[in-house]
Amino acid sequence: MNRLARAAGILSLLLYLSSGPPAGATPVDLTVMTQNLYIGTNTDAVLASPDATTLTAALNSILANKFPARAGAVATEAARAGGPALIGLQEAYIITAPNVNLNYTQILLDQLAALGLHYTIAGVHTGFNVATSVFSVTESEVVLARTDVPDLTITGSEGHTFVNNVTTALGPLNRGYALVDATLDGVPFQFVSTHLDSNKSIGEAQANELLTRLGMTAEPQLVVGDFNALPTDATHADMVAAGFIDVGGAVGAVGATCCQAPDLDNPVSQLSGRIDYVFDRGFSSIESAFLIGDTPFENVRPRWASDHAGVIAAVAVPEPSAGSLFAAAILLLGALRLRAHSRDH
């Protein structure tokens, strides 16, 4: 078989593939999760006046709110959902003090592993980082990826700090986002975990910084996190105007996600506003969405896994477009013809 005949055969195969999947082909679903882990104390007093009294009270509250137990509750929710392929975490803290060493991400990874769910850290943005007279603290946005999901590949990651940020008595909050490039079943997409500021104007400015970055690619994208914005706020409107779908809103999963009492000891839920979201742009369809952590996991403090409820959602990964496969076929044929011509001469 000569080169051109071989090229024609390859072209025929690619054109056949570009005609679409066989009848009855099953779409590939992608399940994701977002969860603000919550430091375990009301940080307003500390950020406003970080003296020994407020810092000590904050550390005592953090310890009383037992993150290892709360992480176990979060891991249980993830397991009940079948183990999302990707998890976006906000307020993933590292807290150190004499006789205290709490790494929220690692603790959660260990709790997930204990339930047979194995994840790796796929992306990180390191934000607020300060050493006080009582304890040291680092806050991050983290993306976890399942290591055993067939055909899920992480191809890159980025961490970005927003230009627009709030400065406190302990320094800038340095909010930002972790962005992960991935493929599932050969289809590339991006997954982002972010935590926007509670100041509405600053939060909106941060969202627009994120949208500018996301506008640099046409790949399907999922953006999850604590947006500190209600569905009636400008930040939510900006996401929708940019072509993103509020997945929970689309399927009626519109329960409140914020916020329980700071001590997590309220027996009745105090969730009153929906500010945690999964946003989708470019996926084939939305399959489902539901809240997690909106019921107490035990009847003593800490009753709640976090002061925020989380969201789990599933979307369908789009098939490679016929146009892109046709273009690839034409380019391949052209390259093979050129190569054959150059060798013959």
Image: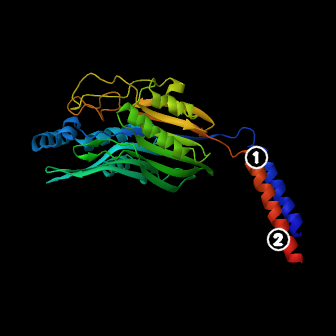
Q: Is residue 134 left or right of residue 162?
A: left
Spot occupied by residue 2 in the image (x, y as percentages of width and height)? 89, 70
Tell which circle, 2 or 1, labels the residue nearer the N-terminal end.
1
Task: Tell me whether circle 2 and circle 1 mark residues in contact (CB < 8 Å).
Answer: no
Eyeballing the image, is 125 above or below 264?
A: below
Give the secondary structure at mark 1: helix
* Residue at the (43%, 40%) spot, across then down: 206
Spot occupied by residue 287 in the image (x, y as percentages of width and height)? 57, 32
Eyeballing the image, is 150 above or below 41?
A: below
* Residue at the (48%, 39%) spot, across then down: 208
The numbered mark at residue 232 is none
- Judge the density around disc 1: few (<14), some (14-19), many (≥20) Cα neighbours within 10 Å: few
- For the residue pair 29 and 15, the one nearer the viewer reads as 15
Give the secondary structure at mark 2: helix
- For the residue pair 48 and 224, the one nearer the viewer reads as 48
The quarter holding residue 43 reads top left
Name the kind of residue labelled 2 in the image.
Arg
Spot occupied by residue 106 in the image (x, y as percentages of width and height)? 32, 52
Eyeballing the image, is 297 above or below 53?
A: above
Q: Is residue 220 left or right of residue 45?
A: right
Q: Is residue 47 left or right of residue 283?
A: left
- The quarter of the image holding the N terminus is bottom right
Residue 303 visible somewhere in the drawing: yes
The residue to which callout 1 is attached is 323
Spot occupied by residue 165 in the image (x, y as percentages of width and height)? 36, 43
- For the residue pair 302 and 274, the one nearer the viewer reads as 274
- The quarter of the image holding the C terminus is bottom right
The residue to which callout 2 is attached is 339
Residue 246 visible somewhere in the drawing: no
- Judge the density around disc 2: few (<14), some (14-19), many (≥20) Cα neighbours within 10 Å: few
Name the kind of residue labelled 1 in the image.
Gly
